């Protein structure tokens, strides 16, 4: 009988602090304010950042949750602003909420010389003008820097001339496509700062990731030094790993959200203030509602109805609703909150007793960051990971030594991705005409060739050796930092005419095709029409609430160029550039809860083409026959191994399985063999397939172990089934996948 419920309890010991006296040479006003705020000593890493920033070094502080990273960059910044009233600091956060939270902290120093202000999309124009004239610490986000400050730099030239410090907070969030965009925005910022005779110091704050200095250097284009020795204290932590039980039919597990809600209700009933992190807005709402139902009419020691002390927190709420929830959480009025990462990136939560993670958050970095929200006052705390039906979740809760000892993943950015770099070069040319030599200096060796391609396409004009933007439109307006390119599809409620959301063009075919079910703030809507030319999906409320939809698609991969191969015995292993052609050909109407297919509907959508990077392995018929994988079992074995490998790749890189695609085929025309492809799901690639290629034995060992140890009979979402399979998870051969993975690993090089 497979264990379920609490399958492992790890007791992590407390950690003592390492402190340094507040330096005597700090400005007197700042030192006095620290005393009033109760800061008697600095953690060792805070003192190190202060000392090194004084010499002008570019730094990234990458220490644990609640380790005082904010104070680490605030001290040298305030010191510099106090020493030179003409200096300006620019703070960049991934979300508006985090910038506002930091503003409250900075104003808490009550230093009149520090004139801090938030500048974001909600700032009225008259206030923007006042901020530009008077503020010396501007808190904003990469999106506004990209769309407003850089294109209109002539209005901001005084600020750019006086720019002394640039702070990039939560820099680990800037990874993948978003991080690559941010890296190019920062290069454009540095170019304009130099144009106005400024040379700012960059200070970054990151969660604990595997390569903080390397990532910060790639992000900024500078040599950045990592400060990673955490001097802050940590209370003891009881870490639980929880596996929902298999249902009676042994083909699926009990709902992870229901298990989480039951735990939340139990913790609140025991007067344990608890924060739950879910991976979706809907998940936060479901957990909070189910926990309230479990608590019923039970009352706390003070007579308060416990169900009233539980709530949800997510993006999409009104600002006033969010602020009230934040205050109630800080003061202890709220005893249980189910939240998305909107809370993690929005406020500095402290004093919690327990944190529950409804599903693996995607990375070890995010796992420890969120678990660290508990026990932040130095007291004992509890953290529980509740596994969802996913290969990676199942692997980690059944291999606790792997989770506890696993080093954090590397963050990957690729500012040289031509699909991202090309549009940013257009932005740079609009900001200030760019010659080939300057382009190579700021944006890399491939930039001059891309400029020539832009000229050939008529988007830029070459005159006197410089490249000029020719349109009257804003080049920046055509570049969304949080997508891989293409105009997003707006989702419009036909009953109100309001835009209620948007989706990347590349995802629109799967998510908002005609007939698709779409959830928004507890309402179930159905797409009545998808207009790809107008980039609009029309939705209306439906009464058919017991149903959901799943797209069906076809995929083909063509190898364009083999970039690198590795010796793997009788197996061909390669990394290269590929063209992926996919087409959504229809969808299935499913009954919620059972997954029963009620109807299959055909669609007529155009194919989509993606040029990206893939890793692939190809096996000839003789080695497959020797392993006992005949032609009848080969398609299902390949397909199941492909799904499991995609599910496990986030173990090696900061990514989500939705960032990755795959294809398996019993005979591929380009290899003339049975082949499995795993590819990056963004144009030009994002380094994810390459990470698998570099660490393929490790990747495949974890994949095999996950499939082999899963207690389901024929394959389930915890091992080989995929929520995004275009073929409805058919065919799948779980046992054949283990045989195939054993075969691959038997051919692996001994030195790998």
Image: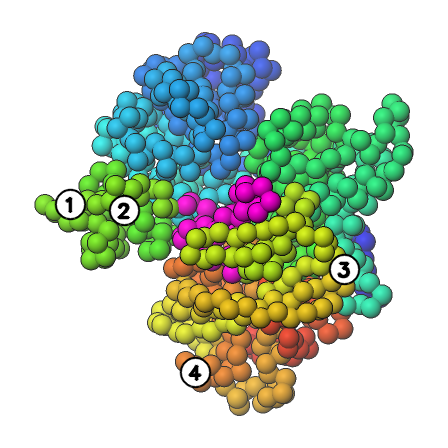
Do the residues bearing badges 1 and 3 touch, measured as CB atoms within 8 Å?
no
Residue placed most toward the observer, 553 or 81: 553
Give the SS element for disc 2: helix
Q: Which residue is mark 3?
A: 593
Is tag 4's residue or tag 3's residue first in the polypeptide sequence? Answer: 3
Q: Residues within 10 Å of mark 4 (few under 14, many from 20)?
A: few
- Marks 1 and 4, how far apart in space? 45 Å
Q: Is residue 711 left or right of residue 623?
A: right
- Marks 1 and 3, how far apart in space? 61 Å
Mark 4, mark 2: which one is toward the viewer? 2
* Magenta region includes residue 316: no
Q: Residues within 10 Å of mark 2 (few under 14, many from 20)?
A: many
Is tag 4's residue or tag 2's residue first in the polypeptide sequence? Answer: 2
Mark number, residue 466: 1
* Magenta region includes residue 500: yes
Whether residue 126 is visible here, answered yes or no, is: yes
Q: Which residues are magenta?
A: 480-509
Residue 452 picture quarter: bottom left
Residue placed most toward the observer, 418 or 504: 504
Q: Which residue is mark 2?
A: 426
Give the SS element for disc 3: loop
Mark number, residue 669: 4
Quarter of the image with the N terminus in it: bottom right
Q: How is the image coloured?
A: rainbow
- Marks 4 and 3, how far apart in space? 40 Å
- Marks 4 and 2, how far apart in space? 39 Å
Q: Name the residue rendered at 36%, 72% in the picture.
A: 560
Give the SS element for disc 1: strand
Do the residues bearing badges 4 and 2 touch, measured as CB atoms within 8 Å?
no
Is tag 3's residue or tag 2's residue first in the polypeptide sequence? Answer: 2
- Marks 2 and 1, how far apart in space? 12 Å
């Amino acid at each position: 009988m497979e264990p379920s419920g609490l399958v492992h309890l790890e007791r992590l010991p407390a950690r003592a602090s390492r402190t340094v006296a507040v330096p005597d040479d700090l400005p007197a006003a700042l030192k006095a304010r620290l005393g009033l705020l109760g800061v008697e000593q600095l953690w060792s890493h805070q003192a190190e950042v202060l000392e090194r920033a004084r010499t002008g070094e570019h730094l990234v502080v990458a220490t644990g949750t609640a380790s005082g990273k904010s104070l680490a960059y605030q001290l040298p910044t305030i010191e510099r602003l106090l020493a030179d009233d003409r200096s300006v600091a620019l703070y960049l956060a991934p979300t508006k909420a985090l910038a506002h939270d930091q503003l409250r902290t900075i104003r808490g120093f009550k230093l009149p010389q520090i004139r801090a202000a938030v500048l974001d999309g909600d700032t009225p124009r008259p206030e923007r003008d006042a901020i530009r004239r008077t503020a010396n610490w501007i808190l904003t986000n990469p999106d506004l820097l990209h769309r407003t400050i850089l294109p209109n730099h002539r209005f901001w030239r005084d600020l750019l001339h006086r720019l002394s410090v640039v702070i990039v907070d939560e820099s680990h969030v800037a990874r993948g496509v978003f991080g690559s965009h941010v890296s190019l925005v920062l290069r454009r910022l540095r170019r304009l700062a130099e144009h106005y005779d400024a040379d700012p110091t960059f200070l970054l704050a990151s969660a604990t990731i595997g390569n903080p200095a390397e990532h910060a250097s790639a992000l900024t284009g500078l040599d950045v030094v990592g400060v990673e020795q955490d001097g802050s204290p940590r209370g003891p932590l009881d870490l639980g790993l929880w596996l929902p039980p298999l249902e009676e039919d042994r083909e699926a597990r009990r709902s992870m959200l229901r298990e989480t809600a039951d735990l939340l209700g139990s913790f609140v009933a025991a007067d344990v203030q608890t924060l739950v992190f879910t991976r979706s807005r809907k998940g936060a709402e479901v957990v909070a509602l189910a926990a309230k139902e479990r608590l019923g009419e039970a009352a706390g020691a003070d007579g308060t109805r416990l169900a009233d002390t539980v709530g949800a927190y997510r993006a999409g709420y009104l600002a006033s609703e969010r602020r009230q929830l934040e205050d109630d959480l800080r003061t202890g009025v709220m005893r249980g909150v189910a939240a998305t990462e909107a809370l993690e990136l929005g406020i500095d939560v402290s004093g919690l007793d327990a944190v529950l993670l409804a599903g693996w958050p995607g990375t070890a970095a995010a796992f420890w960051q969120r678990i660290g929200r508990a026990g932040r006052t130095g007291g004992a705390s509890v953290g529980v990971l509740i596994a969802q039906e996913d290969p990676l979740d199942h692997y980690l809760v059944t291999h606790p030594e792997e989770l506890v000892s696993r080093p954090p993943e590397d963050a990957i950015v690729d500012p040289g991705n031509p699909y991202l770099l090309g549009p940013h070069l257009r932005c740079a040319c609009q900001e200030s005409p760019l010659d080939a030599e300057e382009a190579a200096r700021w944006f890399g060796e491939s930039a001059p060739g891309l400029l020539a391609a832009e000229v050939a396409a008529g988007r830029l004009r070459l005159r006197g050796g410089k490249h000029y933007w020719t349109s009257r439109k804003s080049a920046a307006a055509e570049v969304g930092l949080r997508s891989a390119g293409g105009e997003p599809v707006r989702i419009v409620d036909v009953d109100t005419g309001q835009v209620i959301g948007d989706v990347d063009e590349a995802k629109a075919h799967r998510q908002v095709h005609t007939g698709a079910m779409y959830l928004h703030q507890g309402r179930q809507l159905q797409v009545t029409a998808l207009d790809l030319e107008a980039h609009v999906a029309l939705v209306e409320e439906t009464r058919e609430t017991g149903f959901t939809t799943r797209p069906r698609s076809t995929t083909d991969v063509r190898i364009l160029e083999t970039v690198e191969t590795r010796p793997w015995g009788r197996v061909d292993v390669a990394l290269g550039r590929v063209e992926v052609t996919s087409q959504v050909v229809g969808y299935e109407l499913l009954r919620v809860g059972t997954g029963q297919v009620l109807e299959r509907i055909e669609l007529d959508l155009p194919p989509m083409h993606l040029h990206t990077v893939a890793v692939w392995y190809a096996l000839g018929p003789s080695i497959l026959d020797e392993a006992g994988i005949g032609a009848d079992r080969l398609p299902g074995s390949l397909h199941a191994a492909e799904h499991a490998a995609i599910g496990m790749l986030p173990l090696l890189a900061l990514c989500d399985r939705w960032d990755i695609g795959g294809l398996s085929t019993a005979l591929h025309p380009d290899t003339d063999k049975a082949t499995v492809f795993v590819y990056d799901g963004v144009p030009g690639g994002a380094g994810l397939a390459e990470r698998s290629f570099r660490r393929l034995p490790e990747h495949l060992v974890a994949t095999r172990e996950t499939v082999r140890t899963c207690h389901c009979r024929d394959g389930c979402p915890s091992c080989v089934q995929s929520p995004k399979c275009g073929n409805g998870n058919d065919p799948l051969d779980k046992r054949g996948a283990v045989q195939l993975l054993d075969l691959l690993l038997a051919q692996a090089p001994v030195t790998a």
